[in-house]
Image (cartoon, helix red, strand yellow):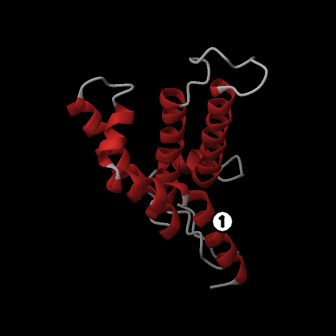
Amino acid sequence: MTFGAYIELAVRCLLIVLFLPFSALDKIIDCRGAVAQAKQIVPSAGPAAVLIVIGLAVEIFMPLGIVTGIADRLAGFVLSGYCVITALLWKRFWVPGDFWRVGESKGRDLFWDFLKNLSLAGGFLLVTFGTTDTTVGRFLAHPFASSHPYAATGQKEQP
């Protein structure tokens, strides 16, 4: 592997480390707490548990795709959507009603978490679409293709 490939691997690891291992492990270790959090959105325990299992699958398999380069574009797309959905469902900074209060504010704390989720979504969209205008069409034509992130510069295969 080239030095650039090691840098790309490190960047991808930084991008996914929140999900794998930490958030996924938290859902496994504190399953009851995770289901209780999901019940804030879905009041019934059964559907809340299903949401947690889906979230756990996303948080394990999509980061693995991004780090290994296997269907990494699709994995980035799914994780981007996951970040936006979780921001809208669990980082609802507008609900506490204290956003503009001077001093401590639950709304402002949630706002920063909301923005972090959106920022992560942007990072995952860079994995999905890259920075060139032709990559969007390639992704749509071949969503399961790999971007071959660790191939030597100039040798990356494009579907």
For residue 36, side relative to residue 79 (left or right): left
Residue 118 vertical position relative to residue 98 in the rendered view, above or below = below
Q: Nearer the viewer, residue 114 or 8?
A: 114
Residue nearest the viewer, comparing 40 with 84: 40
* Residue at the top extreme, as displayed: 97
Q: In which quarter of the image is the N terminus?
A: bottom right
Quarter location, residue 106: top right
What residue is at 62 percent from the left and 46 percent from the top? 120
Residue receiving disc 1: 11
- Residue 18 vertical placement versus 109 (above, below): below
Residue 32, position as x, y percentages in the image = 30, 43
Can residue 154 be spotted in the picture?
Answer: no
Residue 48 spot, x, y in % from top left? 29, 33
Tag 1, which secondary structure?
helix
Asked whether residue 1 appears in the rendered view, the answer is: yes
Residue found at the far right of this picture: 102
Residue extending furthest bottom? 1
Q: Where is residue 140 in the image (x, y as percent from the top left)?
A: 51, 44
